Image (cartoon, helix red, strand yellow):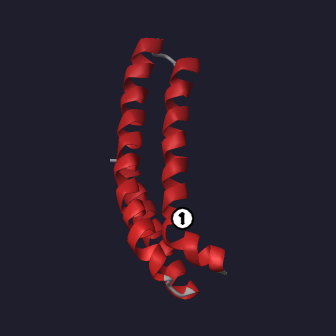
Amino acid sequence: TDFLRLVAPHGVLELSLITVAGAAGFRTGWALLRPGHRTRAEALAVEGRAGVETALGCAVLLLPTGLVEGFVTPRGLSLPAALALGLALAAAFWSTVWWRGRPA
């Protein structure tokens, strides 16, 4: 339980951000391997831009994760409070991903 109390407030969001940034890199690499009907340069320009925007967005969102890790985690929250904070941050992130990623 001590490990969960220390990791839960920031870990769920942090691991989500790392996963999404990695997927952005795979998306860029996939454009080079399988450009489809576009040239490799066109595919890389389109997918590379989207991948860089996603990775930079994830990098910016690591700031609140660091703030939680630096200021909230040392306070020694109870396990339910730590889980609630971690899941609330992750829910906010994933709802934003869902909202921004839906088709126009």
x and y percentages locating residue 40 in the rendered image: 47, 13
Assign the N terminus to one quadrant of the image.
bottom right
- Residue sitting farthest toward the right: 1
Vertical relation: 85 (above or below) 66 = below
x and y percentages locating residue 96 in the rendered image: 37, 60
Q: Residue at x 48, y 38 (%)?
A: 24
What is the three-letter code of the residue carrying label 1? Val
Residue on which disc 1 sits: 12
In this view, the residue in front, 23 or 60, is 60
x and y percentages locating residue 39 in the rendered image: 45, 11
In this view, the residue in front, 39 or 68, is 68
Q: Residue at x 36, y 30 (%)?
A: 49
Q: Residue at x 56, y 73 (%)?
A: 6
x and y percentages locating residue 3 in the rendered image: 64, 73
Is 8 on the left or on the right of 89, as rendered? Answer: right
Q: Residue at x 57, y 85 (%)?
A: 79
Vertical relation: 58 (above or below) 50 = below
Q: Quadrant of residue 33?
A: top right
In this view, the residue in front, 47 or 70, is 70
Is 49 on the left or on the right of 31, as rendered? Answer: left
